[in-house]
Amino acid sequence: MILGHSIPSPSTGVWNLGPFPLRAYALAIILGIVVAVIMGDARWRKLGGKAGEISDIAVWAVPFGIIGGRIYHVITDAQLYFAAGANPIDALKIWQGGLGIWGAIALGAVGAWIGATRAGIRLAPLADAIAPGIVLAQAIGRWGNYFNQELFGSPTSLPWGLEIDLRYRPSGYEQFETFHPTFLYESIWAVLVAIFLITVERHWQVNNGRLFLLYVTLYSFGRLFIEQLRIDPVNEAAGLRLNTFTAAALTLVFAVWFIRRRNDSIRPLALYREGVAS
């Protein structure tokens, strides 16, 4: 029996428009991208950049990011696609869910670098301009996991426990009905990070790429704790989820990087490389 106080899961994550399936997971990702581009463009123009440049860079960054996110997911959850009885072709079915945010950021940064280089834009101020929008996009994208009934946490009797249909419960958890809504925890955390970044930027001089470093540090720090609640099958090392090690490593590395570059914010970098008209 479902508890009286809990969060119900959607009855479906796919709506058919004639022969075309409309997937909530894809819609969440697309909406997140749109928000990131609009917000990034507004912030970039406020810094003195040209309108439309963020959209041009997104043409490179978004495909690279999606590919990177999928590669990271497939590598860290290889057993889902390459274990005995699994279908390796499923690794290509991105619409079924499965994007690793760190892979998306890493390869997305490569795409952004290509786009920025072509436009003569310095990467550091660009990264600061898009950081709050990126983390808001993550907050929105996590709702795709809600519709897919995936990436939830351990069983809980808390009033905000998430109802999970029997067919989506991992082996060994069939008798439990409500679980920690880790998608919601991460979504809320991402929104708080975005608000914090904007607040810090208004009151302190945090520029030349340092705002982006702070974003990665804070997001990874929150993910470090949220990851401990999840129970979906994943590769482990020393009894810890592989994503936990990634979150811990990124928190440490980017925090140190942020601190070591504290003197770099004294004089903001020009938005464009020398010889490029602004």
Image (tube, rainbow, N blue to C red):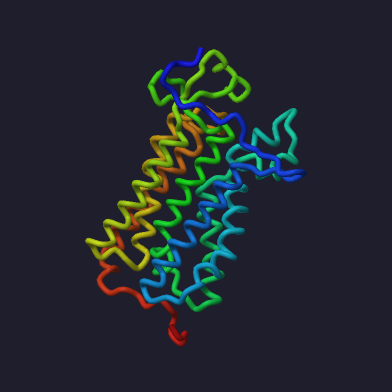
Which residue occupies the foreground of this view, 191 or 117?
191
Q: Where is residue 76 in the image (x, y as percent from the top left)?
A: 58, 40
163 over 205 or under it: above or below:
above
Q: How many marks?
A: 0
Q: Residue at x 38, y 35 (%)?
A: 225
* Image quarter (top left, top right, bottom left or bottom right) of the C terminus: bottom left
**Rendered position, 110 above or below 153:** below
Residue placed most toward the observer, 14 or 183: 14
Compared with residue 196, is residue 55 higher up or lower down, i.e. above or below?
below
In which quarter of the view is residue 23 placed? Answer: top right
Residue 192: give x, y in percent of width and height: 34, 46
The residue depicted at 51 percent of the width and 16 percent of the height is 176
204 vs 242: above or below: below
Quadrant assignment, res 232? top right
Closest to the observer: 231 or 180?
180
Residue at 66% from the left image edge and 44% from the top image edge: 22
Furthest toward the left, the residue is 203
Identity of the residue furthest to the right in this view: 19
**Figure quadrant of residue 212:** bottom left
Provide residue 68's location: percent of width, then percent of height: 59, 52
Q: Where is residue 231 in the image (x, y as percent from the top left)?
A: 51, 27
